[in-house]
Every structure is written in C-alpha cells, then in structure tokens.
Image: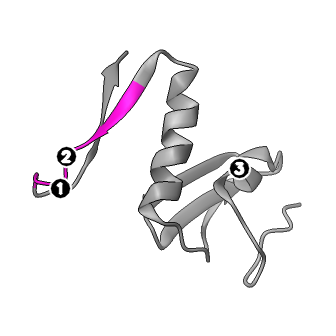
Amino acid sequence: MSTIGPGAALTLDALIADTSLEEVWVNGPDQVFVAEGGVSRRVYMSLSALEIRGFVERVLRTTGRSAAVFPRRRCGCLCLRKL
C-alpha cells in the first residue's frame, strides 16, 4: 500500500519509485494523479514548471527525445522532438 497522503513531502521521483502505484500523471502544477489498485485519485502536491520540465527531460533522455515548450501557443503545451 502506498504511503502517499496529504501533508507528505512528495516528489515526482518518489511517486515513480512507489511500486504500489500503477500509473502517475500530471495534468498541471497542482493536478497530480495516481492509480493504485485500479483506483485513480488525486495526490495533493504542487509542482513548479521547472520541476515538471526537469522530470520530463530526464525521462525523455533515455528515449532519445527532448521536450520543447511553446508558451505562445494557446495550450502552453510541452511538445516532444527527436534529439
């Protein structure tokens, strides 16, 4: 069972390392969710744009891709590109 709960000092790395979690997704700086035991729930943590981007870059490095942020687009999306 996960030890994730309100007030815990969490990082994305800690969530990924938690073997009880089946899935972790980030919809925004204050919108982090996990799936555990087939049940999805929100994790109460706040991430900076720098934390999110740093994590994405570390993960992508292993795939031969990098991230590009396009803040002028309406979506403010994070796009992936090959290195």
Helix, strand or loop under label 1: loop
Q: Mark 1 = which residue?
A: 75
- Residue 25, position as x, y percentages in the image: 52, 53
Q: Which residues are magenta?
A: 66-73
Q: Nearer the viewer, residue 67 or 16?
A: 67
Mark positioned earlier in the residue sequence (3 or 1): 3
Check disc 2 and report the residue beneath it.
Answer: 70
How many neighbours does mark 1 have within 10 angstroms: few (below 14), some (14-19), or many (20 or more)?
few
Secondary structure under badge 3? Answer: helix
Q: Which mark is residue 53?
A: none
Q: Is residue 5 left or right of residue 55?
A: right
Residue drawn 10% across the image and 52% down it: 73
Could you tell me which residue is drawn at 69 percent across and 60 percent down? Answer: 11
What element does badge 2 sit on? loop
Question: Which of disc 2 and disc 1 is earlier in sequence?
Answer: 2
Going by the numbered disc 2, the residue's amino acid type is Phe
The residue that label 3 is drawn on is: 13
Going by the numbered disc 3, the residue's amino acid type is Asp
Query: Which residue: 45% across, 48% down?
Result: 53
Q: Earlier in the sequence, mark 2 or mark 3?
A: 3
- Verify CB contact (< 8 Å) between mark 1 and mark 2: yes
* Rendered location of residue 52, percent (x, y): 49, 53
Distance, label 3 to label 1, CA atoms, is 26 Å
